[in-house]
Image: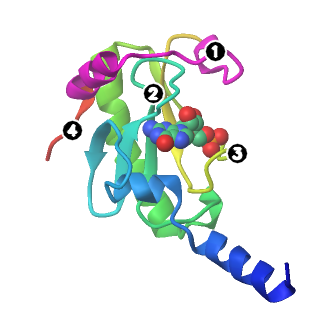
Amino acid sequence: MCAKNTKLKLLTFRNMASIFTRIINGEIPCYKIAEDDNYFAFLDINPLAKGHTLVVPKIEEDYIFDLSDETLAGMMVFAKKVAARIKEVTACKRVAVVVLGMEVPHAHIHLIPMNSEADVDFKKAKLELTKEEFLEITSRLQIVE
Ligand code: 5GP
């Protein structure tokens, strides 16, 4: 393949919407928990616990600390509301706030119901929930404003 084609493919790849942008835009289904003008929260499809939620900014940025101060601060305030709901609904001790970003290049925060440190071990097997279980937890967590 010539260098020009390779460059074109790279540019196309870089310009492709992230999977989370496609979820935000409704192109890929998700279990939506909350949304405002700037942020979106939905259940992680491979959860560590029932209620494991991802909070993302609508603006597409890979690395969380490349977000503007304003977007980063607003994301945490938005996550605080979602975490309060998770804590209330799941009756967990705390809601863990985890940032990895090794899999999806769109900044996001994991909110995970936690009763002990072991609940936030990303090496352990993820839950395999049925659609009905996802829908049930969604209906309990969903914040409609
Ligand atoms: P990280 O980038 O923080 O290492 O991991 C990305 C997280 O996003 C994983 O926990 C993974 O299960 C979740 N994830 C990846 N693709 C999808 C998807 O298409 N839908 C949902 N709901 N979650 C996803």
Q: Amino acid at mark 1?
A: Ala
The residue drawn where x is 34% and y is 43% is: 29
Q: Tag 3 or tag 2, which sits nearer the N-term? A: 2
Dividing the picture into quadrants, the one containing residue 93 is top left
In the current view of this chain or complex, which residue is farthest to the left?
Answer: 145
Q: Which residues are magenta?
A: 118-140
Q: Tag 4 or tag 2, which sits nearer the N-term? A: 2
Distance from Cα at disc 1 to Cα at disc 4: 28 Å
Pointer 2 residue: 52
Mark 3 CB near ligand 1 (8 Å cut): yes
Q: Tag 3 or tag 4, which sits nearer the N-term? A: 3
Instruction: Answer whether residue 108 is visible to the viewer in this image.
Output: yes
- Whether the magenta-drawn stretch holds residue 136 is answered as yes
Q: Which color scheme is applied?
A: rainbow
Q: Does 117 sit left or right of 77 as displayed?
A: right
Q: Position of residue 50 (x, y in %)?
A: 41, 18
Q: Tag 2 or tag 1, which sits nearer the N-term? A: 2
The residue drawn where x is 40% and y is 43% is: 79
Q: Does 116 sit left or right of 1 as displayed?
A: left
